[in-house]
Image: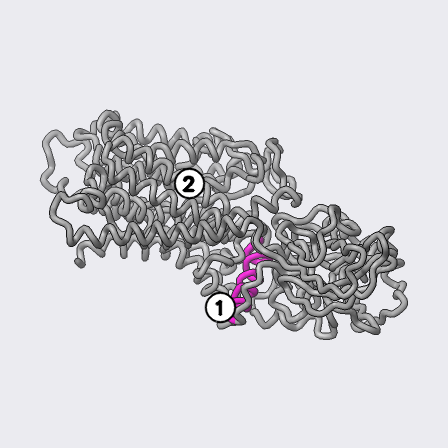
Amino acid sequence: MRSRLWWPVAAVATAILGAMIPLVFDPRFYFVDDTQSGAMGQWYEIGARFLAGDWSLIAPTVWQSGNYLAEGAWGIFSPPLWLIGAGMHLATDAVVYMTAVKLVFIGIAAFGVWLLARTFGAKESWAAVAAVAVPLTGFTLYIDAASWVNGFMAWAIWPLAWALTRRAVFQAKSPILPLLAFMGLIGIGYVHATLMLAAVLAATIVEAFLQKHRPTIVRAFAAATLAGLFAVIVHLPGLLVAPVTGRASGIGNSGLLTVSLNGLAASSTPVGSPWMKFFSGLDAPGAPILYIAWFLPLLAFVDWRTLVAVLRSRVSIVIVLAIALLAVLLPSDFGPLRFPVRLMPYLSASILVILAIALSLAPALRLGRARLGAAAAVTVGSAYFAFSAAPQYWKWIAVVTVVSIAMLYVVYRLLGGGRRSENPARRNAPALVAVVVIGTTVALLVPQHHITGSSPLPDYGNPSLIADYKTQYTDAVGDVIVVGGVRNGDEHPEYWAETLMANMFYINDASVQNAYSAVYYPAYQSGLCMQYNGSTCGELFEKLFEVQPQTGKTLVDLIGVSTIQLVKAIVPEETRDEIPDGWHVAEDTELTRLLVRDEPVAPAGGVVWSSDGTTVTQLSEDAMGASFRVDSVGSDGGTVALSRIPWPGYEVEGATLTKDPVEPFLLGVHVEPGSEGTVVHVSYHAPGYPVELAAGALIVLIGAAWAVLRRLRRRDAANGPFDRLVAGTRATAD
C-alpha cells in the first residue's frame, strides 16, 4: 500500500510546493483581478446564503447582477462552493484564505491527472511527471489560478472526473464517484469546463464502441447521460435567459486573447511572452501564458509506430486533444464563448497525459544521438519562437534553453542513451528520470517568476483583511447606488476606506446594486451606464433625477434607492454640488460624498408604480416574488411596475405579465378591468424548471439502477446476465 501511495502523494505535494514558488516573489500572486473583484465577495455571499438557509435564485436588490442562475458560478448546485463560502466567514485574511483554497485545487488537479494517466496505462513515475507539470503550466498559474478562479476550480476537477469515468466505464467501478465529480465540476457553473467534460464523455463513448464490448458501451452512455442531465439542471436556465442578456452571441474575431500556432510552438520555453492582443490595448500579456512544459521534446525519445498502436486502443485521449486544440485556435468570439485561450489548461493536460502514456508504453528501445539531437532541436526551435515573440527576454530565454538541453542530456544518459550495451541500472531508470524531470519542472519556476513575478492581470490594491470591507457606508440607509467607481485602486488605495467595487459590496452590510455581472441586462446597463464591474459614468447622477416618460417618476424612485455615493473623481463638480430636494449630505470627504433621502423608500423588489386609475396595496415581498391587492382599476385595465428586471422565469397569478417591460427594464404586470379585490402573486421560478425537475428524477433513477446492478453482480453466477452487464474490460485500464 505504501508503494502504491508514494507516487500520487509525492506528486500532489510537489505540485502544491511548486505552486507556492510564485508567493516568494509576490505574496498576493493568487489575489488579483477577478479574484478580488468577483470571487472574493461572491464566496462571502454564497457563505452568507448557505449559513442563513437562503436558497433564493434571484436577488432584486443587485438588479442585473442578481440572476444567479444566468450569472453562473454562484454555487446554487455546488456543495463545494457552499463550504468554501462558509469558510470565508471564518477567515480574517482574504489573501491567505483564497490562496489556501487555490492550493488545495492545485492538489486536486495533480491527483486527477495522475489517476487519469494511470487509467490510460501510464507508469506511476511518468503519471507523476504529468501530475506535477499540468497544474504548473503558464496559463493555469498566471491567469486561471491567479484570477479566474471559477474556471480554475472547474478545470481542476476535470481530469479527476475523466479518470473516475474511465474506471466506471472500462473497469465497472461504482458510478457514485464519477457522478459526484460531475456534480462538482458542472455545479460550479463554468460553461467551458462543462463543454470539455462533454468532449470527454463523447470520446469515451467512441472508445467504448471501438472495443465492441456491449456492457462497456452501455456504461459509457449511462455516464454521459448522468452528466448531461445534471448539466441541464445547471445550465438550461442560463441558456433560456441568454436571449435577453447583452452577452455576445455571434462569431467574430477581435484578436483578443486568441492563440496562434507561433505561440504554441514556444510552449516548451518557460519564460517570455506570446504575441497576442491582451487587455488594455497591450500587444502581449508579458507572461509565458502558453508555456506547457520544458520536457515536451522528450517526444523524440518515443517510438512513434508503437505509440500509434497504443493510442488506437486509447482513442479518447486523442479525440479530446484534437477538440482542445481546435477550441484553443477558435476566434475571439464564438457564440457566447469568449477568449479561446481559456481552454489552454485542457490542451496542456491532454498533451502531457499523452506524453506520459508514450514514455511509459512506447519508449524507443535504443536511444541514439539522433534522438537527442532531435530533442535539442525542438528545444532550440521553441526558444526561437519565444524570442521572436518577445526579444526583450533573450538573455533568460538563452539561459533556460541551455538548462533544458542539459537536462535532456541527463535524461538521455539515465535512459541508457549513447551506450553500446544494455545498462542493467536502466531497469530502475524511469523512477530516477521522473525525479529529475519533476525537479527541473519545479526549479524552472524560479527564473520564470523572477522575470515575471505577478499575473499580467491587474491588482486593484484592495485590502487583504475581510474586516476592512465592512467600514464603508456606515451612514447608508436602504438600497445604495454608487455613481462613478474606483479607477486604478492600486495607485490610490485610499479609496478603499470609503468605497468598493463589483462583488466586494457583498461583504459590506449595505445593500449596493453595483455588483459584478457577467451577462448584464442591456436596457438596465444603458439606462444606468453601468459597466460589468459596477462602475458607472459620472452623468448617472443627473440621470437618476430625470423624470421617465412612461411612469412620470424619476429613475432613482423607480429603482428604490435611498442612498447615493458620488465618487468625486468621476462626477463633475458642478453636478455633484446640486443637492436634490428631499436629500441631504450624510458624509462628505475629499474623495466621495454620500447623499441620503430625508424619507427612505422601500428597497427593490416591490411595487413602484401603477398606471392612472389603478391603485394597489403591496401585501408581501421577498427575493423570489411579491404579492399585492388590486384596490382599483380602470375600464381598460391597468399596469403595475415592480422594481425588478423582467428576467424569463417570472410568473403571475391573478394577472398577466406585460409584453414589454416598463421604463424599459422594470417588470410589468397587467391587471384586467373589474379585478378589484384580486390578490396578485408574482413569483420567480428557474426557467425550464419542469425539465430540470425531470432531469433530477432521471439522475436518481439511472444512478440507482446502475448501483443496484453492480450489487446484484455479487449474487449472480459467474457469467450470468447481470455479471455480463457490469463486468469491466481491461483493454485499456491499468
What separation in Å lies between label 2 and label 1 (alpha carbons)? 30 Å
Say which quarter of the image contains residue 731.
top left
Q: Mark 2 points at which residue?
A: 198
Left or right: where does residue 514 sit relative to residue 342?
right
Chief secondary structure of the magenta portion: helix
Residue 85, visible in the rendered structure: yes
Numbered disc 1: secondary structure: helix
Numbered disc 2: secondary structure: helix
Question: Is 626 covered by the magenta stretch?
Answer: no
Q: Quadrant of the C terminus?
A: top left
**Mark closer to the chain start, 2 or 1:** 1
Amino acid of disc 1: Ala
Magenta residues, start to end: 32-51
Measuring 65% from the left and 51% from the top, which residue is drawn there? 647
Question: Is 45 covered by the magenta stretch?
Answer: yes
Outermost residue toward the front in this view: 674
Amino acid of disc 2: Ala
Q: How many labels does the image show?
A: 2
Q: How is the image coloured?
A: one colour
| 2 and 1 marks in contact (CB < 8 Å) | no
Q: Toward the viewer: 345 or 509?
A: 509
Q: Residue 332 carries which label?
A: none
Q: Toward the viewer: 668 or 265?
A: 668
Q: Neighbour class for label 1 at 10 Å: few (<14), some, many (≥20)?
A: many
Residue 18, visible in the rendered structure: no
Q: Name the residue under label 1.
A: 86
Residue 81 lies, in percent from the top left, at 47, 60
Residue 263 lies, in percent from the top left, at 48, 33
Residue 483 lies, in percent from the top left, at 76, 58
Q: In which quarter of the image is the N terminus?
A: bottom left
Left or right: where does residue 727 sit relative to residue 189?
left
